[in-house]
Amino acid sequence: MFLRDSELRGLPVRTVGGTRLGKVAGVIIDVETQTVVQYAVRKTRGLPVLSPPRLLIRASQVVSLDDKEMVVEDNTVTVEEGVGIEVSERAAGTAPSGAVNAVRQAGRG
């Protein structure tokens, strides 16, 4: 199955446990390998105009993706504005399999 950029944007995102995270806002691509590295997800609750919280979800954390929704692993961590180190320890090979792979960014637009 293929999804166009226009079909991917706005796709609902939830965790395996059923928590709604928001909607796909875009993708981050590794230009050397031409692969999707992360998905940017805009949280849909609250007042996004004031300070839109965003998630960066690694492609390796996606459990399923189709034309209806994206389902991701449950583990995320909150990162305060100005603190954000966006590194997955699992991707670096230094953490156990339950490591954090999504980063919640507060206050980034």
Image (cartoon, rainbow, N blue to C red):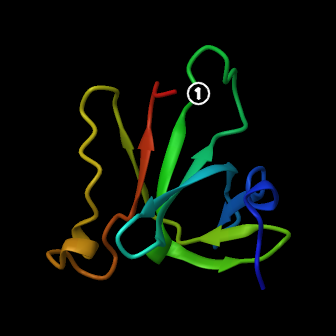
Q: Residue 62 location, x and y as percent?
A: 56, 74
The quadrant where residue 93 appears: bottom left
Q: Which residue extends farthest right?
A: 68
List the residue tagged with mark 1: 52
Q: Which residue extends farthest top?
A: 50
27 or 98, nearer to the observer: 27
Answer left or right for 104 relative to 49. Answer: left
Q: Residue at left 56%, top 20%? A: 51
Answer left or right for 4 relative to 94. Answer: right
Q: Residue 90 location, x and y as percent?
A: 26, 74
Q: Which residue extends farthest bottom?
A: 1
Quadrant housing the N terminus: bottom right
15 or 92, nearer to the observer: 92
Q: Residue at left 45%, top 44%? A: 104
106, above or below 15, in the image: above
41 or 36, nearer to the observer: 36
The mark total stands at 1
Q: Residue 81 location, x and y as percent?
A: 34, 27
The quadrant where residue 50 appears: top right
Q: Amino acid at mark 1?
A: Pro
Answer left or right for 61 relative to 68. Answer: left
Q: Residue 66 location, x and y as percent?
A: 78, 76
Q: Which residue extends farthest front?
A: 32
Instruction: Count residues near mark 1 (Cα–Cα under 10 Å), then give few for <14, some for 14-19, many for 20+.
Output: some
68, above or below 8, in the image: below
Q: Secondary structure at mark 1?
A: loop
The quadrant where residue 92 appears: bottom left
